[in-house]
Structure formats: C-alpha cells, structure tokens
C-alpha cells in the first residue's frame, strides 16, 4: 500500500530527494490508474452522475498533498486524485464514494468528488469554482483564535475559478489577515471549454496576487521536480508566517472536463506543445535518466498500482449501499466528520491595524 506521511523539502541530489521523487511518482501513477479505472466504470454504467478526472495534472496535485503534514488542511478540487492520495486518502475511499458504498466517507450518499474527511483536514468540496478558499480561510482564522499554530491550509483551484468573486474576496481576506493559506491554481488552459484568452487579459494569473499584496510564483505543471520544489517552498513560507502564497501552474487537462466531454475543442497544436506534455511520462523519463528506475521497475510499480485499484474495486463491490431508512441525510454535520480542537489556553485576538502602540 502506497501511503503518504511526510514532508519537508530535501536538498536536490540527495537520497531524500530521490525518495521523495519516487514516492511522488508512484502516487501519481496510482492516481492515474485509479482515474483510468473510474473512467472505465463510468463507461460501463457503474457510476451514476458525473466522473471528473485529473489526467495531466498529477504532478502539481501530488506536490500539494506531499507538501502538507498531518494537522494541515487540504481543500482539493475535482482533479486532485493524486493530491488526495498523497494527503492520506485511500483509493478505497474514492471508489466507495463513486460506487456508493455505505462504508465510504460520506456513507455512499455523495456521488463523486464532494467527499472528504474534515476531521483529518481533508475538506469535502462545495464547488469547484473557488468556494473552498474562504472555507479554508475560516478554518485558519478559527485556529488562530483558538491558539492553534504551525498549520497551513492549501486550496486547489482551476484557472476558471480565478474569474469568480469568491477567489478575489478570499485572496484579499487571506492577505489582510496574513493567513497561512497556499492557493494553488492549476491553469489547464480551459474552464470547461472556455480558453484562457476568453477568461483573462493579464499576462499571467500570478499577476492577480500583486493587487492583493500576495507573493505569487509560477511553475511548469508538467515537471514533477519543479512542482515539488515550488509548492513545497510556498507551503514552507506560509508555515513560517510569510502570509498567503499563490502558486500558478501551467499545464493541460489531458481529458475532458468530465468523462461525458470529449474535449474536441482543445486544438491538436496545444496538445503537442510543452504544456501538453504528460507529466507522468515526463517523470518516468526523469526517473530513468537519473538512474532511479529502469523500465522493469516502472512496469512493476504500475502492476502494483493496478492490483491495488482492482483489489479496492472488488472490496467495494462486496460492500452494502446506503440504507435510506437509516440515513439522516446530514452528511457534513455527522458527528464522526467534525474536527475537534484541544481547548485553547487563552483566546487569541488577532492584531489589528487600530491597535494603539
Ligand atoms: C458557481 C458555479 N458556476 C459554474 C459551475 C459549472 N462549472 C463547474 S467546473 C467549471 C469550469 C471550471 O474551470 P476551472 O476553474 O478552470 O477548472 P478546471 O475544470 O479546468 O479544472 C464550471 C463552469 C459550478 N460548478 N459552480
Ligand atoms: Mg481550467
């Protein structure tokens, strides 16, 4: 079973860097295999509702999950299978949700990507369009008031989400309150079928940080090493008290918006460009070039991931569906999901500009 503990950024070229890269690659691979399995279950009519996958976004996503620690908060978006696995969600939880098992985190009532385990810092998504940023802000602010320190919150969004009011309000709020928020934007060039050029006129979405006084960096989302480095550093800065951080990654969604969408609006030329590289293939080539894995090892890792996903599917197919007579239908207010903090020693009032010296 591949699981994440983790993480602080190791020096490049060290054994720790090699270990992190391999762990990240194997989680990306597991996410890809899981996504491929979900797609095939969707096509065979086993999944009701939508099926939303993250092919091509695994490098950025895994870097998000691996840069966080126990106690942090992660608000993934619909393309974050890799980040979820890296943060500790199991393939079993994903499949239990999609296939409607009563043993799933939402007891099989949820459908697809709106699952989570808030008690463990994994937030169930409300909407894909930036709504989770202010939820993460609220958690971070509450923690500050309760005297809980040293944790960060990472919200993952798409380029389209940066066009919403929710994004701008929440980024401004995080900046004003100097919250330890890391906002990671996967610019996959499209919001559903709307291309970047119909969404924004600034040079880069990273420029949106400037207006709010937020440090922003860009990263090649097809390059795993770069994603681990840049996201890891942003999380470390937020944890150290440098305030909110914006990370904008360039990549391409290598699938439709959902499995119902053939993405025929994405031009072949863009698919063949640098941004259209498959981050999983790029990482595999880097592993081989660095002598960290040969073709045989890569094939063995894939076989292990396939076995893990197949076993999880078989397990879920033996599990019971939800029983409407027994459910109260209050998914998130369910007692077992609510985060519990230790009582604070003393309430902490945040510093305010109006405080007299
Ligand atoms: C408030 C709201 N408006 C519209 C939608 C429908 N919708 C879901 S995802 C999406 C596009 C999101 O694009 P982006 O933020 O770039 O993320 P991506 O899907 O490309 O990863 C839209 C329009 C929604 N879920 N919620
Ligand atoms: Mg997008």
Image (tube, rainbow, N blue to C red):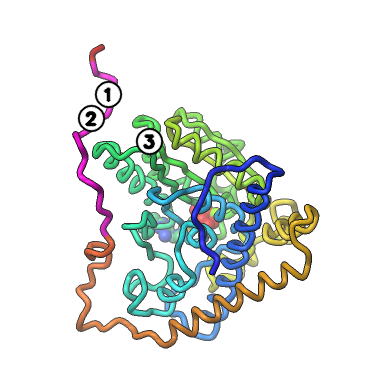
Label 2 – label 1 distance at C-alpha: 9 Å
Local crowd size for mark 3, using a 10 Å CA cut-off: few (<14), some (14–19), many (≥20): many
Q: Does the residue labelled 3 lie within 8 Å of ligand 1?
A: no
The residue where tag 2 is placed is 349
User: Is 296 in the magenta?
Assistant: no
Q: How many labels does the image show?
A: 3
Most foreground residue, 346 or 47: 346
- Check if mark 2's residue and mark 1's residue have beta carbons within 8 Å: yes
Q: Position of residue 262 (x, y in %)?
A: 61, 71
Quarter of the displayed picture in which ligand 2 can be seen: bottom right
Q: Which mark is residue 179?
A: 3
Which of pointers 2 and 3 lies earlier in the amino acid sequence?
A: 3
The residue where tag 1 is placed is 352
Q: List the single residue furthest toward the bottom.
A: 318
SS assignment for the magenta stretch, majority: loop
- Assign a secondary structure to mark 1: loop
Which of the two discs, 2 and 1, sits closer to the camera? Answer: 2
Above-or-below relation of 174 to 34: above
Residue for point 52% across, 81% down: 311
Q: Is mark 1 within 8 Å of ligand 1?
A: no
Label 1 – label 3 distance at C-alpha: 14 Å
Can residue 159 be spotted in the picture?
no
Local crowd size for mark 2, using a 10 Å CA cut-off: few (<14), some (14–19), many (≥20): few
Residue bounds of the magenta highlight: 338-355
Q: Which mark is residue 8?
A: none
Is 253 displayed left or right of 107 in the figure? Answer: right
- Assign a secondary structure to mark 2: loop
């Amino acid at each position: 079973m591949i699981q994440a503990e983790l993480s602080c950024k190791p020096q490049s070229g060290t054994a720790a860097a090699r270990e992190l890269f391999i762990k990240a690659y194997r989680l990306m691979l597991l996410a890809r295999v899981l996504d491929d399995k979900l797609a095939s279950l969707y096509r065979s009519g086993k999944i009701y509702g939508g099926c939303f996958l993250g092919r091509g976004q695994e490098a950025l996503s895994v870097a998000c999950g691996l840069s966080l620690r126990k106690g942090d908060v992660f608000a993934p978006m619909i393309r974050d299978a890799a980040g979820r696995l890296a943060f500790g969600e199991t393939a079993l939880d994903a499949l239990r949700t999609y296939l409607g098992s009563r043993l799933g985190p939402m007891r099989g009532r949820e459908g697809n990507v709106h699952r989570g385990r808030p008690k463990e810092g994994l937030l169930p998504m409300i909407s894909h369009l930036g709504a989770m940023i202010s939820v993460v802000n609220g958690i971070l602010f509450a923690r500050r008031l309760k005297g809980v320190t040293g944790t960060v919150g990472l919200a993952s969004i798409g380029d389209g989400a940066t066009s919403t009011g929710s994004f701008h309000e929440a980024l401004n709020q995080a900046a004003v309150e100097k919250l330890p928020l890391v906002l990671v934007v996967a610019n996959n060039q499209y919001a559903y079928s709307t291309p970047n050029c119909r969404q924004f006129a600034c040079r880069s979405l990273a420029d949106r940080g400037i207006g709010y006084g937020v440090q922003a960096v860009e990263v090649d989302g097809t390059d795993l090493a770069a994603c681990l480095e840049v996201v890891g550093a942003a999380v470390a800065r937020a944890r150290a008290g440098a305030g909110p951080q914006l990370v904008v990654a360039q990549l391409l969604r290598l699938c439709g918006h959902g499995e119902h969408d053939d993405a025929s609006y994405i031009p072949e030329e863009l698919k063949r460009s640098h941004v259209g590289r498959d981050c999983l293939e790029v990482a595999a080539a880097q592993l081989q070039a660095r002598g960290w894995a040969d073709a045989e090892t890569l094939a063995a890792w894939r076989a292990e991931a396939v076995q893990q996903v197949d076993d999880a599917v078989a397990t879920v197919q033996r599990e019971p569906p939800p029983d409407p007579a027994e459910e109260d239908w209050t998914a998130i207010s369910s007692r077992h999901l609510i985060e519990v903090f230790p009582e604070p020693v003393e309430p902490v009032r945040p510093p305010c500009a109006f405080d007299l010296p």
